[in-house]
Image (cartoon, helix red, strand yellow):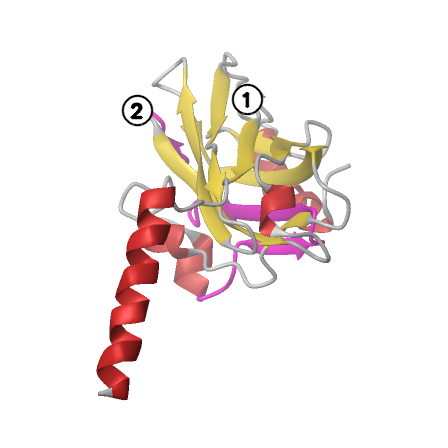
Amino acid sequence: MPSPLFSRLLATVAIGFLFTAPAARADFVLTIGSGTITADGNLTLDVMIENDDPSESLSYFELFLEITPVAATVGTTLQFAALQSEAFLMDTDYVFALTSDAIASGGSTVDFNGGNTLTLYDFDEDLNGVPIATSKLLASFDLSHSLGSATAADAAGNQFEVSVNTDDSVFLNEFLEETDWSTNTGSITVGAVAIPEPASVALLTILAGGACLRRRR
């Protein structure tokens, strides 16, 4: 269901639609990044956007992301970081880099952060739309992993997915019409714990012993 912000945006521009001829629809294609996160660590992933029709532009997006555990040790969690850096707003490849309402107003793209859900939004402040002729950065999001009562060895290899909620996400073209879109699912794996090789352990033991002897002398 569209958010109040989206509803207000539509109401603001509704009069302009009365004399606007409908345009042919094209598909926006979203690509969510995948990666490996350190146990009890953090990870930032990108969401890219492109279009199968370079002539169509993007005026507004509301991106509703969700985290789903695929194979996770009991007690461990992967969540959207409580404080999102939103560093993508300063990236020259950001889709609204020159026309972002969030940048112009000094505001935030985060509409809601529920831990396992995150809603981001922004729009072209002139509502004229930005052409998507090549793949562009739509957003980035920060993830945080927590071991809870588990050990790093227990969590190694755990997997989570980040997906886009198709019911609540919205993308408007230059005519402020909802346009079709598709997406993949991002995959996050908790990294394995590095175990020293026997030779490395022996070397460390010798070095530690040598250090003890030097101190005694």
Point 65% across, 54% down: residue:
147
Going by the numbered disc 1, the residue's amino acid type is Asn
> Does residue 127 appear anywhere in the picture?
no
Image height check: is 196 above or below 31?
A: below
Going by the numbered disc 2, the residue's amino acid type is Thr
Between circles 1 and 2, the one closer to the viewer is: 1
Task: Pick the residue in front: 37 or 193.
Answer: 193
Task: Pick the residue in front: 201 or 186.
Answer: 201
Image height check: is 33 above or below 209?
A: above
> Does residue 122 appear anywhere in the picture?
yes
Total numbered circles: 2
Image height check: is 18 above or below 29?
A: below
Part of the protein shown in magenta: 106-133
Reply yes or no: does residue 23 show up in magenta. Answer: no
Neighbourhood count class around disc 2 (C-alpha, 10 Å): few under 14, some 14–19, many 20 upward: few
Residue that mark 2 sits on: 134
Point 45% across, 54% down: residue:
101
The kind of secondary structure element at disc 1 is loop
Reply yes or no: does residue 128 show up in magenta. Answer: yes
Residue 194: name its quadrant: top left
Neighbourhood count class around disc 1 (C-alpha, 10 Å): few under 14, some 14–19, many 20 upward: few
Residue that mark 1 sits on: 184
Residue 67 position, x and y percent, is 67, 39
Point 59% across, 45% down: residue:
153
